[in-house]
Image (spheres, rainbow, N blue to C red):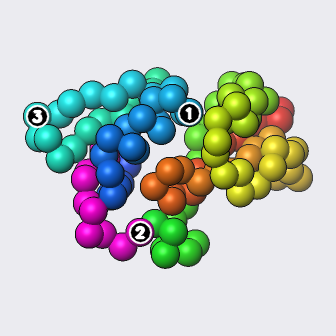
Amino acid sequence: MIQRSLFVLAVPDLEISSDFYRKVLGFSIQEIGDPGWRMYVRDYCRIMAGHCPDAIPALELGDHSYFEYFVVNDVDAEYQNVLSHDVEIIKPLRSEPWGMREFGLRTVDGHRIMIGQDLD
């Protein structure tokens, strides 16, 4: 039985990344006892971010830079919030035949995230 799932990301600058997740995506930022790591928390989502300035940049990972699909209650509100910041939108908001209304963005670290809402 899987009890929970956490994402682990390498980020080049922990302060810049933390600021992005707090301001743009609404996460709270928690210290976890190691100055090179932070936990980003929003509702049931947990992302552990590690300061890794020498890691391969996420932009160079191509398709492997996707790490999450957030399913939310109000994707239109999430989209408007993201648009109010200087964020790269990689897929504009639209309803899809697979039953999701969704959009995609690229984080300040170069990772890609999809955010969607069930249409049913």
Numbered circle sitting on residue 33: 3
Q: Is residue 4 above or below residue 114?
A: above
Residue 45, quarter of picture? top left
Q: CA distance from mark 2 to mark 1?
A: 20 Å
Q: Residue at x 51, y 58 (%)?
A: 111
Element assignment for label 1: loop
Residue 17, quarter of picture? top left
Q: Is residue 52 magenta?
A: yes
Considering only order in the chain, which callout, 3 or 2, is on the residue closer to the N terminus? 3
Numbered circle sitting on residue 38: none
Which quadrant is home to the N terminus? top left
Residue 66 spot, x, y in % from top left:
54, 61
Residue type (three-letter) at the residue carrying disc 1:
Val
Which residue matches tag 1?
Answer: 24
Whether residue 2 sits left or right of residue 65 in the image: it is left
Residue 102 spot, x, y in % from top left:
76, 44
Give the magenta-colored segment's residue range.
47-57
Residue type (three-letter) at the residue carrying disc 3:
Gly
Q: Residue at x 46, y 66 (%)?
A: 58
Residue 90 spot, x, y in % from top left:
71, 57
Q: Residue at x 83, y 32 (%)?
A: 120
Numbered circle sitting on residue 57: 2
